[in-house]
Structure formats: structure tokens, C-alpha cells
Amino acid sequence: RSGLVAGVLLWAGAASGQVVPALPPGQPPRAVTVPPAEPIGDSIYPHLGQKGLDVLHYDVTLYIDQPGTRGLRGVAVLTLTGTRPLNVVSVDLLGPTVQDVRWNGQPAVWQQDVAAAKLRVTLPAPLPAGQRAQLTVTYAGPAGTLVDPELGLDLGWVPVQDAAGRPVSSYTLSEPDGTRTFLPVNDHPSDPATFTVHVTVPPGVVVAASGVGGAAREVAGGREFTFEQRQPIPTYALAVQVGPLERVDGPAVPATGPEGGPVQRRDYFPPDTSDAVRAPYAQVGEMLRVLSGWFGPFPFPVYGAAVITPRVPALETATLLTMPVSSSSERVIVHEGAHQWFGDTVVLGDWADVWLNEGFATYAELLWLESRGDDPGRIAATWYDRLRAQPTRPLVATTEPQLFDASAYLRGALALHALRAAVGDAAFRTFLRGYVQDHSRRPVRTADLLASAQRTLGPVARTVLGVWVESPTLPPLPAWHRLP
Ligand code: ARG
Ligand code: ZN
């Protein structure tokens, strides 16, 4: 997003009538300036993140006094280190007002640059590479407003009202950079981290979030729910929902999870969710069996969905899909399920490579339909017809509008289909499992996939994939004969 757009969005947020809570008494005015740090250098979102900053864990405490509004209060404790020595730590934060910042427990020198959507901290002494430190940020809403320019859709912390305009619930929809609307964060997928999330809500409200747990304890003014996301995930893959949710626990899925263990099942539904909307979630166990057969063990010990009522795209939030009622079909659930491997575990090194997420997730739809008896050649031909009817491009994106276009999804999927058609199912399966294993929790670029293909499948396969990745024109539809 350009500076101009960001400025307009900030202005729109400020003008929407919400009042920023007063700072606690005794807070000194923040007149200091902290020099900007070098951002990660993403080719689509050059302003996001800090180069050399490695956040290992976010311990997040949120107080949601009124679900369905932008109001929130929070304390975030970031356990972090540097891959190079750091003099300044700079995190992304869009919307909330920072009230207090501590470095290893001591009051810090800091600046909230609202225009740049950064919180910057001058370190009392340089942090040597590899040494750990704790950054504690106390802040209060309103959560930031951020609109996806392609879909005109609210990103980040999104409040939901009923037809009469009464506040009801809130959900997160953060891909690519919405997490910074409710949390100070190194907001780039190349820095995945673990999360502990504590959320306090009024009586009767339920919290759902990524990770294991979800038990509530009574606290003053309501209940506190706690979740532990113990496998590192990209920041946009963190799900947090608050509202009148019904939690439904299902039978664990044996032998599909980490180290051959079970995957615990739980879903959350809003009030009055119909049986038709609930029905496809009963297939999740079977989906895990089919997908883990191709990709290797499901990466998390728990899995399910939290269903929302607004008509927005589904999102592959880790261990807990964000699933609109309108997208609650087997096919979309399988797509988001595949992202638990491709996107949430094998994480992006740069947003330009997002086809590595969307191509694999779309191909998983074919693998699922094939397991139900459908003809993969027919599905691939349908995709090809859709692609032929529009302009095409090499798979590495060069502009923001390309990130989630048909090329990322369908040409990306056909690239994998072409590879499979060339090498056969056994080799393709070995390749998929090796790629996941070698790149889990490591940022990948398109070149890494090509190198994997070369290593596992040889130069001919690398060339087949390379043509689909690089050609400015649409390569021919691969002939489909099942190879063993
Ligand atoms: N990753 C989502 C999917 O499962 C798509 C999200 C689209 N989001 C966006 N901000 N354009 O395909
Ligand atoms: Zn997707």
C-alpha cells in the first residue's frame, strides 16, 4: 500500500468516531524520535517487518470489553533475537495506541510513528546476534482499519454487527498484513513464531484461537481463555475470534498428526448454524487422511474451523480455519487444510511467491476430488479452459493485484499437475513429502521449489516445472495418463 493510501486509511479510522482510551496517569509525553530500521525488503510490501529481527514467541494478552467493536486493550510480550546485531527494534502496529514499552522489564526509549505504522525502540545497549531479549508493549485500541485493495474487504481485526447494528463478535482475517491491526508484530511470513494467546471477554462470550487449549477461567469482569500455538506460524495465520460461539469437539483423527500421533478435532459455530453448513466439517478427518498421504503428517496436534457469517474469503488460519458460512464446502475446506502444510508450515520468504501457497492448496482440491472418484484429467482441463480465457503470467508475482489471481491458483496448480504427469505418482509423493520436510518453518522462494525438484526428481522434471513457472505464455495442458 502506498503512503497515500495508508494515510487515508488512518484518517478514516480516526474519523470513525471511536475514542482512543486515555493514557494512564503519569505517562511522560513521547517526544523522542527513534531512527527507522531497515525493513525486511519484501518485493510487494517493502515497508513490512525489520531485517534481522527474529521474533521467537508472542505472549499476547487481550481484553475485549465489547465484542463487535474495534475496542481492545492488550499487553504483548515478544521474545526476540537478532540474526545480526540490533540497535533499534521496530515492529509493525497500525491502529492501537501504545501506552508503555519495556525492554527486558525496564522502561524503554520508544516512539510510535503512526504515519509509518511502526513502533520503534532504541535499545539501551546493542543486542548481539543470537542473544534473546523481551519486549513488552502495553497498548489500547481502536484496532486499525485496513482494506484489501483488490477485494475491498476489511483485513485484520474485524468487528461484526447484527442487522440492527448491535455489536456481536469479532474475527481476524489478516492475510497479508492485518495482524498489525491488533498486535505489535514483525508482520512478515518469513519470521514465523509461536504464540500464547490469553483473551478476557465478558460473561457468556466465547473465544476461539489458533493452538491447543481453549479452556476458560473466571476472572474479574468475565472469563479468560488461553491458547498455545506451539509450532511456529506466520503472523497472518493467527486466528482469534470472540463472540457467541458454540464449541463442538469431535473424535481425534488417529495417526495423521505430528510424529504419527492423533490430531484433536474441534470446531466453533455461530448461533443457529444450519446442519447443512455443519455437514462438510464432518469430513475433516477423512481429508486429513487423504492429504497426509500425499504431504506427510499433518503439522499440528489440533485442527478445525471457526465459522463466521460475513461473506468474505476463507482463510487458512493455523489449526483453526476462518470459514465463512458461504464457503463451507468440502472443496474450500480441503483447500484451506492443505495450506496448513503450504503456507502455515512451509512459510513464504516473499509475498511475490504466494503461488507456492495457492498452487499447492488448489492442487489439493484435485487430490481430494480424485480420492472421491473424480477424474483428475477432467479437473485439470477445466482449470486450463479457465486460464486460456484470460491473460497469463510467470508465477512469481510482480504486483499486488497478481497475488491472489487465477495464475497464482490455477496455473500454480497446473504446474504441479504437469510435474506429477511427468514423473508419476510415487515420485511425486516422495517429492512433496521431501519438500515439506526440508522447508518446514523455513521461508521458501520459488527457486527453492525448483531446486527441490532438481534434487529429488532430476533435471528433466526441473525443466517441466520451470516452464510452468517461468514461461510468459501458457504452456500446453499436460496429457494425463496415470503413472504408478
Ligand atoms: N489465502 C486465502 C485462500 O485460501 C485467500 C485470501 C485472499 N485474501 C486476500 N487478502 N486477498 O485462498
Ligand atoms: Zn488458498
Image (spheres, helix red, strand yellow):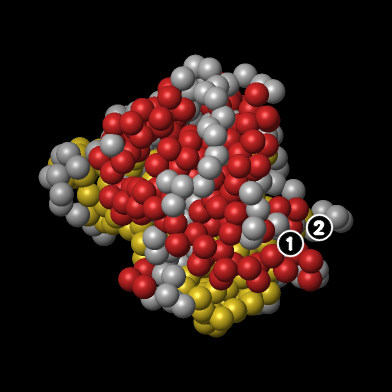
Q: Quadrant of residue 348?
A: top left
The answer to whether marks 1 and 2 mark residues whose Cβ atoms lie closer than 8 Å is yes
Query: Mark 1 highlights which residue?
Result: 168
The answer to whether one can see residue 5 in this image is yes
Vertical side of 154 occupied by 64: above or below: below
Mark 1–mark 2 distance (CA, rounded to whole Å)? 6 Å
**Residue occupying image coordinates x 41% and y 32%:** 465
Rendering coords of residue 184 (x, y %): 42, 48
Q: Secondary structure at mark 1?
A: strand
Query: Mark 2 highlights which residue?
Result: 162
Which of 413 and 380 lies nearest the eye of the viewer?
380
Q: Secondary structure at mark 2?
A: loop
Q: Name the side, left or right, on which 159 lies relative to 358.
A: right
The answer to whether one can see residue 141 in this image is no
Vertical side of 213 occupied by 463: above or below: above
Give the residue type that dot 1 points to: Val
Vertical side of 161 occupied by 115: above or below: above
